[in-house]
Image (cartoon, helix red, strand yellow):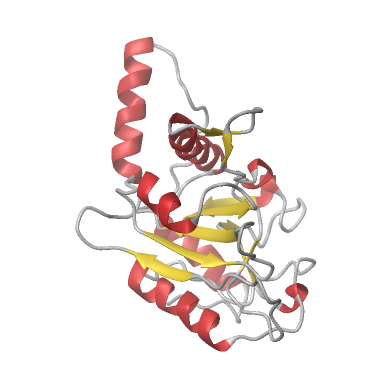
Amino acid sequence: SIKDNVAWKYFCNSDFEGFSSVLQTLYEKLRPKAKNDVMLACPAFFNPFGEEKPRGLNNAFFMKGLWFDVEEGDIYPNEFSEILGDLEIVIYSSFNCRLGAPRYRAYIPTSDVLNCEQYGVIMKGLVARFEAKGYGVSEGLKRHRIDRRKLHGVSLFYLPGQPLEPADDYFPYFKIFTGIGRRPFDVAGWRSSLKAKEDALETPLITGPDERPAVAQKEVFRGANEHVEFD
């Protein structure tokens, strides 16, 4: 639930095909009575030995995968995927998705782990792609309605689950966008591009990168809780 501080399951080693299959199974099988009955996901892996809030930003060890929350905007899932046409994506309707007022979540895999600051910069850069296509928040513009409050890596996102008793105008949607031309977000390529810009400007654009190896990070979690699983 939204109040839980201990993860039920980690999907650190799952590839896109494996994780998208999990999402599809949840979409097809779960029929919750209420939105709060749906499980949640978080891109962050938290330090179980930290002294900060269990799910606090300062306690986030690293992030894997990028998540979007879109609420009643003017952009439908297919167009969302077209604007991010170079990336693999899973898009699924949320519990209260309606025709004319689409509400959905989007998941994009990453090729590597990220720290908090890197995650936020990448998310803002992806939002800028929609703004370049004429979507925004100003009057007169089409609204993308991407929730900017959830552009940081410790946000929670409801997983798929169709309502047990859907409204008459409920809009069910689930689709995996993959294949030729699509790939996970290239973290190494992004870092190289960022470094080139920093070298040209002779100033760091992101400070304090977390260079701890992903393997070491996984071992911390493996030893912290016997219920932690890595697929």
Give the image location of residue 196, x and y in percent: 30, 22
Q: Residue at x 42, y 72 (%)?
A: 20
Residue 213 visible in the current orientation: no
Q: In the rendered image, which quarter is residue 161 located in?
A: bottom right
On screen, 198 above or below 159?
Answer: above
Give the image location of residue 212, x and y in percent: 45, 47
Give the image location of residue 115, x and y in percent: 51, 44
Which of the pair 140/203 is nearer the observer? 140
Q: In the rendered image, which quarter is residue 140 located in?
A: top right
Image quarter hosting the C terminus: bottom left
Residue 201 appears left or right of 26:
left
Total residue callouts: 0
Residue 88 appears left or right of 26:
left
Which of the pair 91/37 is nearer the observer? 91
Q: Residue at x 62, y 67 (%)?
A: 94
Residue pushed farthest left? 180
Image quarter hosting the N terminus: bottom right
Which of the pair 190/31 is nearer the observer? 31
Residue pushed farthest right? 3
On screen, 229 above or below 80?
Answer: below
Residue 211 visible in the current orientation: yes
Which of the pair 228/174 is nearer the observer? 174
